[in-house]
Image (tube, helix red, strand yellow):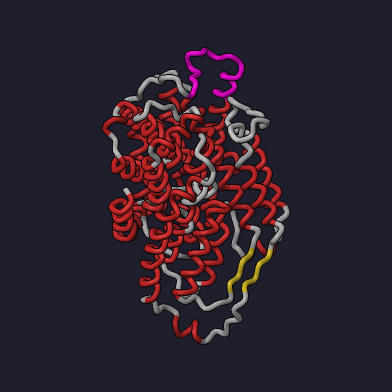
């Protein structure tokens, strides 16, 4: 049963590892490209698999829910394989596939380790879930997202947030949680969100983001929280039941040993050859020391978790499995789109201004992985000064010349991740956990049209008008 259910996924992994092994043992050099090498531009038609997958994610849960829930892993992998075959056998480009697969492995390693480690922690807030208490909770989540990442904060706090509001929970509670804790909150440090971390790896000083973004972050997060407060204040659901409960005002915390695992995950993020020269690179294998540590924490934290805590959290692996299946397809099918965008940006960098960088990075970060989007536009911005994003000294030179471009790219890459379910990894996981808790979450389009556009977009327009 297990083999049958996971056959296609395991087959894809074996194919990609086989390609990396060919590179290791001396495959044709024409198929192995360095990061700075010129690759053959893919056909515009190769963005179709990504667009199809995006449309299926948006429409499947609405119009053909049973079919989608049963077959989405196969569909995601099949569309991803179309891109793999095209790159390996038509473009003769194995590097692009290996590169994106390496990013996918890092992505899943981080999400799964944080998901499992936080699943062994039980937080119970025995306080009346008033709008003001919810505001404090979300603000706390937004702040600590800069310390343990948006994924870590989301996985640690979503269950207690749901339980605290259990008698009055509505979809908007989860959506504002995604806005604040899973995205906008983590805009102040490289730990907060992956694009900022990739900027740190490329040479952006660790505290540059905080120093240059805090004055944008504060009004943005306060505006979103204010919108939440007025929406939550109108929610009278379960009021009679809530008033009859005698709240102790205490906060129960169990599973403290898992904080060690969370700390280990955060420290592992920095175990990278670009940060620490002594760290060995396992290239061209699509895994590094960092990912080995994170997958090890997945095993140890689950094995050593207290069964009562797992039961109280209603913990299972379905949310991370859903993310793993969907995002392997998303990561692979978006390769042609990212390359076309990258080539256009580099060829037309003289025509790009601050407004273009803000809106282009933001809009594309809402539907593509925000890390390569950030990197592509950072490269284009540096191209305006004839500088190379792959040289750390030139990144520092670029910041000293005019850091408004980097500020616009950094802010929009993080903020706009909240615009869709696929804009940032934790979004889908929070959605999945909430649905398993019995909350009827809006569809992809409903999330965008009913919440993201009317609430976030006006705030982002104001941010643009004031700061960029």
Q: For the view shown, which residue lies furthest in the front direction?
A: 400
| Residue 9 or residue 307, whichever sits in front | 307
* Image quadrant containing the N terminus: top right
Quadrant location of residue 370? top left
Q: Residue at x 66, y 32 (%)?
A: 279
**Count of numbered circles on the image:** 0
Say whether residue 33 is magenta: yes
Q: For the view shown, which residue lies furthest in the bottom direction?
A: 244
Range of residues picked out in magenta: 18-35
Q: Residue at x 44, y 48 (%)?
A: 212
Left or right: 362 as drawn, with respect to 285: left
On screen, residue 132 above or below 50: below
- Is any part of residue 179 visible from this angle? yes
- Residue 414: x and y in percent read 43, 48
- Is any part of residue 338 visible from this angle? no
- Residue 48: x and y in percent read 33, 34
Say whether residue 165 is magenta: no
Left or right: 145 as drawn, with respect to 458: right
Q: For the view shown, which residue lies furthest in the left direction?
A: 351
- Residue 225: x and y in percent read 41, 65
Q: Residue at x 55, y 84 (%)?
A: 245
| Residue 26 or residue 405, whichever sits in front | 405
């Amino acid at each position: 049963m297990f083999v049958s259910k996971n056959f296609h996924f395991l087959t894809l992994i074996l194919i990609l590892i086989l390609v990396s092994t060919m590179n290791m043992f001396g495959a044709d050099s024409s198929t192995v490209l360095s990061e700075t090498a010129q690759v053959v531009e893919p056909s515009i038609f190769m963005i179709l698999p990504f667009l199809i997958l995006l449309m299926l994610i948006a429409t499947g849960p609405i119009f053909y829910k049973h079919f989608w829930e049963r077959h989405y892993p196969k569909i995601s992998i099949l569309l991803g394989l179309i891109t793999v075959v095209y790159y390996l056998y038509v473009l003769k480009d194995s590097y692009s596939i290996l590169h994106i697969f390496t990013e996918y492995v890092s992505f899943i390693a981080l999400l799964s380790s944080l998901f499992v480690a936080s699943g062994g922690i039980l937080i119970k807030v025995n306080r009346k879930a008033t709008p003001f208490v919810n505001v404090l909770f979300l603000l706390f989540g937004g702040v600590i997202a800069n310390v343990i990442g948006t994924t870590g904060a989301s996985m640690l706090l979503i269950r207690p947030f749901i339980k605290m509001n259990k008698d009055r929970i509505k979809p908007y509670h989860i959506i504002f949680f995604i806005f604040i804790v899973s995205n906008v909150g983590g805009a102040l440090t490289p730990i907060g969100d992956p694009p900022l971390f990739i900027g740190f790896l490329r040479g952006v000083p660790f505290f540059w983001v905080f120093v240059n973004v805090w004055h944008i972050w504060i009004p943005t997060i306060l505006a979103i929280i204010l919108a939440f407060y007025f929406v939550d204040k109108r929610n009278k659901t379960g009021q009679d039941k809530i008033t009859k409960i005698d709240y102790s005002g205490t906060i129960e915390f169990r599973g403290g040993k898992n904080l060690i695992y969370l700390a280990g995950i955060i420290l592992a993020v920095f175990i990278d050859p670009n940060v620490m020269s002594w760290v060995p690179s396992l290239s061209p294998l699509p895994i590094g020391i960092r990912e080995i540590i994170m997958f090890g924490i997945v095993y140890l934290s689950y094995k050593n978790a207290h069964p009562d805590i797992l039961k109280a959290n209603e913990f299972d692996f379905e949310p991370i499995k859903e993310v793993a299946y969907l995002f392997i397809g998303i990561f692979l099918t978006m390769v042609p789109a990212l390359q076309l965008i990258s080539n256009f940006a580099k060829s037309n960098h003289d025509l790009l201004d601050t407004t273009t960088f803000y809106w282009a990075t933001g809009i594309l970060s809402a539907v593509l992985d925000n890390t390569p989007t950030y990197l592509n536009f950072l490269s284009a911005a540096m191209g305006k000064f004839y500088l190379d994003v792959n040289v750390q000294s030139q990144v520092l030179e670029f910041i000293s010349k005019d850091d408004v471009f980097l500020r616009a790219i950094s802010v929009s890459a993080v903020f706009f991740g909240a615009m869709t379910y696929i804009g940032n990894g934790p979004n889908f996981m929070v959605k999945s956990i909430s649905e398993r808790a019995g909350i009827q979450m809006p569809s992809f389009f409903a999330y965008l049209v009913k919440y993201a556009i009317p609430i976030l977009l006006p705030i982002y327009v104001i941010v643009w008008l004031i700061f960029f």
